[in-house]
Every structure is written in structure tokens, then in C-alpha cells.
Amino acid sequence: MFTLFAEPGKYAYHSCPQIADHIKTWTQRQQELKSLMERADQAAAGPAVSLLAYRADYVAAGEELEQLRATAREKKCDQDAAWASSTAIK
């Protein structure tokens, strides 16, 4: 998986509870950044501020979450219902 900000293999030696804690933290951070970007977009120069101030951090948070979820799948960690796909393979 190609990432700009997240380091591949960063969570390889973390336990499942540690991965779950990191997922919770990064999910909260991503939601916070999304909220800040939405508020910034309402101002006149908001889109530029949003892009410069928050977009890179938002992308980094998303990449960290992808790394964490991939590691959780590889380690076969118990996953929240929110992580699971709603589609079944037939």
C-alpha cells in the first residue's frame, strides 16, 4: 500500500488492544479535522485555509487508519461492527 504520510509496518509489533486504541485516537483526530475543514469552508477564504492548514493532516490520519486496519486484519484482531464490511462474498 502506497502512503505519503504513514509508515508501512509501523504497527506490526503492536498488540490488538494497542491497535484498537490507536484506531480510536486516529478516528477522533480525523473527525476533528473534518469538522475544522467544514467550518473553514464556510468563510470567504475558507477553502484555501482548509487546504493549507488541515488537508495534509486529514490525509495523514486517513492513511494511519488504513495502516492500522490492515494490521488488525493481518493479526486477525477482533473487529468492531463498524470495521466490518456490510457485503458478503458469495
Image: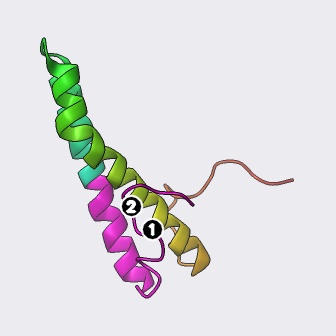
In this rendering, would 67 be left or right of 51? right
Q: Nearest the camera: 65 or 10?
A: 10
Q: Looking at the image, do the residues carrying marks 1 and 2 touch, with CB atoms under 8 Å apart?
A: yes
Q: Is residue 3 above or below residue 21?
A: above
Residue 22's image quarter? bottom left
In this rendering, would 68 be left or right of 85? left
Give coordinates of residue 55: x percent, y percent: 28, 39
Which amino acid, mark 2? Glu
In this rendering, would 8 be left or right of 84? left
Residue 68's disc number = 1
**At x 71% / y 48%, what residue is drawn?**
87
Please tell me whether mark 2 sits on a helix, a strand or a loop.
Answer: helix
**At x 39% / y 51%, what residue is drawn?**
62
Quarter of the N terminus within the rendering: bottom right
In the rendered image, which residue does mark 2 sit on? 64
Q: Nearest the camera: 41 or 84?
A: 41
Give coordinates of residue 78: x percent, y percent: 53, 75
> Is residue 7 inside the magenta stretch?
yes
**At x 23% / y 27%, what residue is drawn?**
38
Residue 47's image quarter? top left
Please tell me whether mark 1 sits on a helix, a strand or a loop.
Answer: helix
Q: CA distance from mark 1 to mark 2?
A: 6 Å
The magenta stretch is 1-28
